[in-house]
Amino acid sequence: MEENNQLSDQIVDNEILIKKPRAKKRKKTVKAKKHIKNVLNNETNSYSTDLKSDIAFSAKSSKPIRIYRKIAISFTILTALLVGVIFYFSLVKVIIVLIPNQENISDNLSIDVYDQEKNVTLGNDVAAGVVKQVEVTESKTYQATGKTILSQEVIGKVTIINDHNKSQPLTATTRLFSANNKLFRIKNTVNVPAGGRVEVDVYADESSKEMAVGPTKFTIPGLWAGLQDKIYGQSQTAMEYKEKVKITIEQKDIEQAANDLKLALVVKTKNQIDNDFKSYDQVIYEIDNNTLTQQVDSKVGEEKEQFNLTIKTMVTVVAFADEKIFELAKQKLVSSLADDKELINFNKKDVTYSLDNFDLNQGVATIKTSFIGKITLKKDAELIDKNKIFGLTNEQLSQYLNNIPEIAGYEIKFQPSFIKKVPNLIDRIKIEIKE
């Protein structure tokens, strides 16, 4: 109980203690509320201020972000453009392969050839060789064609067959008719025994080539008709037409022979000169017609079947080595070329020589040399003006190239293949000249 009473007293005391502060607390609460309100107001104001500051800061901080975004986008675009430019400069190009025309160029020059035996000292623009005359002779036998017919005949042999039981005499000139009614006569009298046969000589009653009949059967019209099938003739070979003529030499025979022999003389001259001067590269010769003579061993009208004709002439010969002349000709061709052209083909077979004039006493001859070479564009020739083909399509570029006469053909390569126009940069246009 005491403990309870003490506890009660303690509780009472505590209650009193609690109540007292509560009474005081009410007064303080009003103040506290005011204080709290003030604090809250201050906090609110502070928060509002902070919020405004944050909003202001946020507004201020969002502005650089937009700038950074623009910068990033611009950088990306510039990077893409730069990559595109690098791609363009590194990959885009056009290659034009040109096949140039090859054209012939010709020229000529005159050069003196000196005979080495008569001229010891020679200059650089002359050639050493042989300048001389040689004699060439040619002979041949020809047939005379002048003919006078003294007589003509058609003769042959016929076998007379006697199948009769009696012999049959036949006198000279007995008529024989061939199967095609050509009349022949027996030359000599014969007697044909019964059951036998005799070969006789016969001749045509008319002497012409048409009477030369072939093997055939002959009837004897002078016999009784009943005997003609028992006594008849048979030839085994054709009749022969013969003429007895006189052959004489006519003027035309000599003229024709001379023309023929002159041709033969040309052939002999070439063979003789080529053989005698074969140690030289080039040999030019010319027949001197003023020295040509001919000799016939017979006269016109003379009765001869053949005659001999001989022709003699002097031939001017110029022989020389051709290496120096070939080099001089080549130099002349090259010196005449434009700067963008070059000589690609020139051989000794493209050089021809002809004799212009000569002086045998001085031992010098002037020869005319004609030559032809093949030229084309140099590999570094600037045939195309690149500035004129900027931006051209394949079709336009082809049309441009087709109008250049020095070009025989071409090939256009765009890289990459989807590029359809010529780049607008000189260093992206490559031109190759094909050999």
Image (cartoon, rainbow, N blue to C red):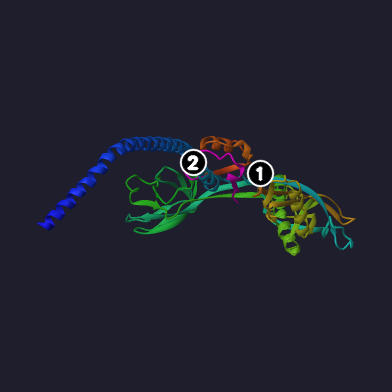
Can residue 248 be seen in this snapshot?
no
User: Which residue carries the number 2 mark?
Assistant: 68
| Amino acid identity at mark 1 | Glu
Q: Which residues are magenta?
A: 414-435
Q: What residue is shown at x 20% (from left), y 46% (from top)?
A: 15
Q: Is residue 411 left or right of residue 387?
A: left
- As measured in the structure, the alpha-carbon distance from the residue carrying label 2 to the one carrying label 1 is 52 Å
Q: Is residue 261 left or right of residue 393?
A: right
User: How crowded is the residue under tag 1: few (<14 C-alpha within 10 Å), some, or many (20+)?
Assistant: few
Q: Closer to the camera, 138 or 162?
A: 138
Q: Where is residue 168, by image quadrant?
A: bottom left
Label 2 element class = helix
User: Which residue carries the number 1 mark?
Assistant: 382
Q: Closer to the camera, 144 or 264?
A: 264
Q: Position of residue 46 (x, y in %)?
A: 41, 37
Counting residues from the start of the chain, the first of labels 2 and 1 encountered is: 2
Q: Position of residue 149 (x, y in %)?
A: 62, 46
Q: What residue is shown at x 60% (from left), y 50% (from top)?
A: 244
